[in-house]
Amino acid sequence: MASSNTAEQSGSLAAVENVHVPTPMHPELLMAASHGCHEQLTSLLNREDQDAAMEHRPRPNSMVVASPAVVVEIDNGATASSSVRASSFLHGVTPDGDSALHVVAAAGNGDGHLKNAKVIYDKARHLLGAPNRGGNTPLHRASRAGNVAMLSLLVDLARAEEEVGGSDNEGRVEAILRVRNGIGETVLHEAIRAADTRAVDVLMTADPCLARVPDNGTSPLFLAISLCRYGIARELYARDNRLSYSGPDGQTALHAAVLRSKEMTELLLGWNKQLAKQQDEHGNTPLHFALSLESETFRMLPLYAVPVKHGKSIGTLLNITEPPLELTKQLLEADAYSAYQPDKNGSFPIHIAASAGRISAVIIFLSKYSGCAGLRDSHGRTFLHVAIKNKRYDIVRFACQTPALSSILNKQDNDGNSALHLAVEVGHWWIFACLFVNKQVDLNLPNNSQHTPRELSISSIPTGLYCLLNSRILIQETLRSANATRHICRRDDGMEKEHNPLSEAKSEEKGSQIVSDSTQFLSVGLVLITTMAFGATFALPGGYRADDHSYGGTPTLAQSKQFQGFLMANTLAFFCSSLAVLSLVFAGTPTVELPMRYMHYNISIWLSLNAVGSLAIAFAIAVYIMITPVAAKTALAVIVVIVSIGALHAPSIIEKFCLLLIVLCVRVGILPVLRSSISKVVLLMCWPLIVIFGWQEFASRY
């Protein structure tokens, strides 16, 4: 056992000894090469030659054994450190593995650098094609640095080897230019990265077929297009029209062009139309890539707080245009069959267009290739399913408004989900409304789990406290109002299965926390409204009568009809906000049981809305009273501005509520809607208007 351990240790030591440790470059050589100091570098290398010559002279303490073929020098006492140091000058490398020729090639284009390169090459010709740790040769370094004169010199040195070396060095220029580094790129790739057309000209002149390397991987043309070096791309094709179009992962230059430039796409299709048919490793054609460009969302107002979703582009102020439609047309003209070419996930181009929100492209597919409407991906989904899954409202609206697409409205995917199922699942109110208002959409289709859309709307909402206009709440209420069915089972079964005291306690705790947090913000606004209403009571429009008047100290406009409305509006604002604050006290008190806290929380919200509305009406009436006698048009303009800003301030409330009324009236009918609780909600929201203007008329008459 001991002998085996000893053998293992000796083997490991031998392995360590055999590991090649690169010699660090001499600092004086590195400095001379970097700064182009020709005299210093020449002096250093000449000193090396002299030291080497001195090292090989016979010494007094050494014995020379001669033979006809071999001379061996045996040193009895002198060290060989100076010999090792001298011979290691051009063998030394930087930490990146760069030789002296690498350093000179990347350092500059001056006369000193060129002379240094020639001197180094003369003393160590093997360095011309020697790679560093990244696989880059000196030509790679010169090309990346944009040192065209240096690059030309190195190419001439390789050509000289080819001319002098005969058959042994035949193709030396081609071989050294086509060397690929660690990431598979040649010298030409480096010139393209540096955007140096002069270097490209030098390289393509030296090897006219250099743009064909590699034939599998990132070609120079692909790199030029991906880096938006369109002038270089044209130059490469002009030099060699049989160049490589390949890219990484099985892509072609056309895959890159459709994401970069419409003009380059046209050029590539003119050069080689077959590129439109080629798929990458994932089955994507250039058409898939072109359609994946997301359309931009246009908004009435800019976003000041921008929500960012990982992997998705953002749109704030600069929503200019959607990606050009001509790109899709060009690719379809080059290869019409690509419209029916799926990728490896089964997604057809129309699915990609729907996912990206490209409604114009979807319209082209449906108008020119009507068979695309029924195409399904690997999940059994049509383009409508995909559009809903990605919340593309415009595409869903188009599908619902196009009679020719009625056949796909109720199609079910592999899980049995129809378009309406997915709309309920994603909880998008506008998409749901589009489908709901179309009477050809079946509200009662069950999926593979026997869940109808209404059942899904119930199960998709977790236990908690929600706003009345929450999209999922509205969806559930709308389906219930339309008498949509649920799956056939006992209604209490789910409740019994889900009964869990621990989960109920957590839900109550969460609901209690939500109410407590909400009351803090609501109370601040309500106290402000109360203060404003209280102040307006004693700072009345028109002022007060003088003390010598028979009704001294009373409001000047007390007999005015509009003044009565102002007083009533201000009074309602004050008392509604005061009662709302009182309700918030109960809602925010943890010692009160949760159902009562919920009740007071709802009362406070209702009173808050009434208080805000009453205060706005009071302000509008006050402006009307004071300004109308002298500037009636200004008073009217102020009132219009107040109403407009109020409408813009709460678009979600107004839009959702109005859309709810419209879709229910279309699907269910006007009379059932009027008989429902919606009329009660409208009355509870509008009663301040009735009281204010009703009292104004009553007071003016009696």
Image: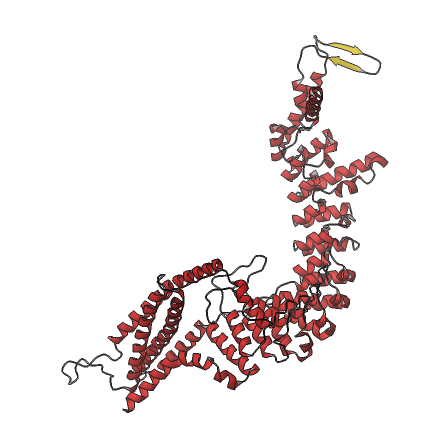
Q: How many marks?
A: 0
Q: Quadrant of residue 667?
A: bottom right
Judged from this view, the residue extending furthest toward the right is 167
Where is residue 343 shown, x and y percent of the image? 72, 61
Res 247 visible:
no
- Give the residue drawn at x 84%, y 35%: 168
Where is residue 203 shown, x and y percent of the image? 74, 46
Q: Is residue 264 left or right of residue 295?
A: right
Query: In which quadrant will I find the C terminus?
Result: bottom left
Nearest the viewer among 185 and 302 is 302
- Give the residue drawn at x 77%, y 67%: 337
- Give the residue drawn at x 74%, y 32%: 125
Q: Is residue 169 above or below residue 619?
A: above
Nearest the viewer among 138 and 245 is 245
Q: Is residue 14 above or below residue 198?
A: above
Judged from this view, the residue extending furthest toward the top is 60
Judged from this view, the residue extending furthest toward the left is 548
Nearest the viewer among 459 and 134 is 459
Where is residue 411 shown, x and y percent of the image? 68, 72
Where is residue 612 shown, x and y percent of the image? 36, 74
Res 645 visible:
yes
Q: Is residue 490 left or right of residue 157?
A: left
Q: Quadrant of residue 616?
A: bottom left
Nearest the viewer among 355 and 458 is 458
